[in-house]
Amino acid sequence: MFLSTALERGFIHQCIDLETLDARLQDGRVTAYIGYDCTADSLHVGSLVGIMLLRLFQKCGHKPIVLMGGGTTRIGDPSGKDEARRLLDDAEITRNMAGIREVFAKFIQFGDGASDAIMVNNADWLDELRYIPLLRDIGRHFSVNRMLTQDSVKLRLERDQSLSFLEFNYPILQAYDFVELARRFGCELQIGGSDQWGNIVGGVELGRRSGGRTLFGLTTPLIATASGAKMGKSVGGAIWLNEEKLSPYEYWQFWRNTEDADVGRFLRLFTELPIDEIVKLEQLEGSELNEAKKVLANHATELCHSKQAAIAAAESARAAFEVGGFAPELPTVAVSRDANATRLCARSDSLGTRRFLDLWRVPEVGLEQPAQKARGKRAQRIYPDLRIGGRSGGPVVRGEQALSFAAEQQRAEYGNVADH
């Protein structure tokens, strides 16, 4: 049931010995793990495919392990990176680990039950390793010739980019993690993104060579949007999975703004709607497809935050963009009424379908002057009580009493206004 559902919904990119793994899954409960280094105090949407697959794995009666890289974070995974990661101290790693656990607790159930998830830290065994025994007992199973062909190493060398000996050891430690989890918890399956394929294969082979274990691995596809943009990022920054870093409203808007060609695929991956219902939704066209995007946004936000948060976000969006009202959940920006005022001027996107806000400071141009002096012929004067909705994460203005919107975000979105 697990593999057939995962395949149907598009979760699986590669799998080691698919038929044997399927037979093992049918035979009884299996333990699988997915690992994350503690490089930030949250995860973003780019990690959500693996999280949703682990959720499906648990719902099918199997046991998930969430492995925190308290040890490997001190090294840094070179996969997909052009340069070494910043090394974190123990306090940062501990803080980040706590934040990541909060994210996972939204999607999977932790506890002491047979299929309840557990979270473990690879520092528990990596910190105890001795160098000579590691080289003798583990290192002898790895071929440097083969390691040099892995993308994480090969691409850095081809680009003449530095790869430290510290990073070169990372695949060995990830493989060791898999074998240690198999020994301690009976773990048989590792799940990871497709950029982890070489490291996963290394763990499967290490298990066979060092202890005669039969282990399995599968990878999820790295998700990009139909236009080629990397999943998990927006113009305003990462799409985080915790409320402290990104509001439920902004999270809802991210999914509502899904490209038309991605709707069906994202409904399969990021919601638990039945496939037959998804097929009906993805066949909608034109303006009707917007309703499918709202369904995606509602269900994705409910999973990550709550049903109440999804309802509130949907209502805020409706009030701002359909009714023309105002909701307190919307990001806002305060507008000065000083004579040498900051000026807000509206513009359209490339399709002319949505208005954006530009923030300008124009000396010697007061509010009584035409906005064209600040922006040009396409400018529009913004009156004190006019409400204008921006795109996801962008500002919404509600007169001079608008709540404060971080100036840093304005600079990040629009650049330094003095440069205009």
Image (tube, rainbow, N blue to C red):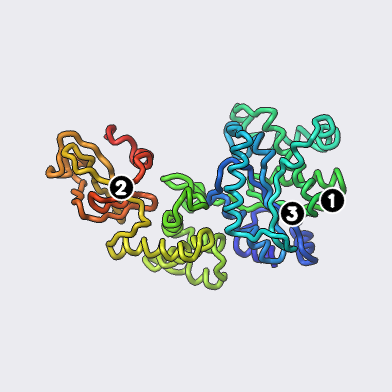
Quarter assignment of residue 344: top left
Disc 2 designates what residue? Answer: 333
**Does residue 346 appear to the left or right of 74 in the view shown?**
left
From this viewpoint, is residue 202 visible? no
The kind of residue on which mark 2 rests is Val
**Does residue 315 appear to the left or right of 207 in the view shown?**
left
Q: CA distance from mark 2 to mark 3?
A: 49 Å
Q: CA distance from mark 1 to mark 3?
A: 11 Å
Task: Give the class, few, some or many, for how many residues have Cα within 10 Å of label 3's Cα (few <14, many ≥20).
Answer: many
Q: Tell me the element at label 1.
A: loop
**Does residue 279 appear to the left or right of 290 in the view shown?**
right
Disc 1 designates what residue? Answer: 213
Q: Which residue shows up at 63% across the image and 58% down it?
A: 53
Q: Which residue shows up at 85% across the image and 44% down it?
A: 209
Disc 3 designates what residue? Answer: 189
- The numbered mark, 1 or 2, whose residue comes first in the sequence reads 1
x and y, in percent, of residue 221 in the image = 60, 52
Q: Are marks 1 and 2 in contact (CB under 8 Å)?
A: no
Q: Which residue shows up at 79% across the image and 62% down it?
A: 24
- The numbered mark, 2 or 3, whose residue comes first in the sequence reads 3
Q: Which residue shows up at 69% across the image and 30% down it?
A: 166
Q: Tell me the element at label 2.
A: loop
The kind of residue on which mark 1 rests is Arg
**Which residue is nearer to you in this view: 4 or 138?**
138
Quarter assignment of residue 205: top right
From this viewpoint, is residue 157 visible? yes
x and y, in percent, of residue 36 in the image = 64, 46
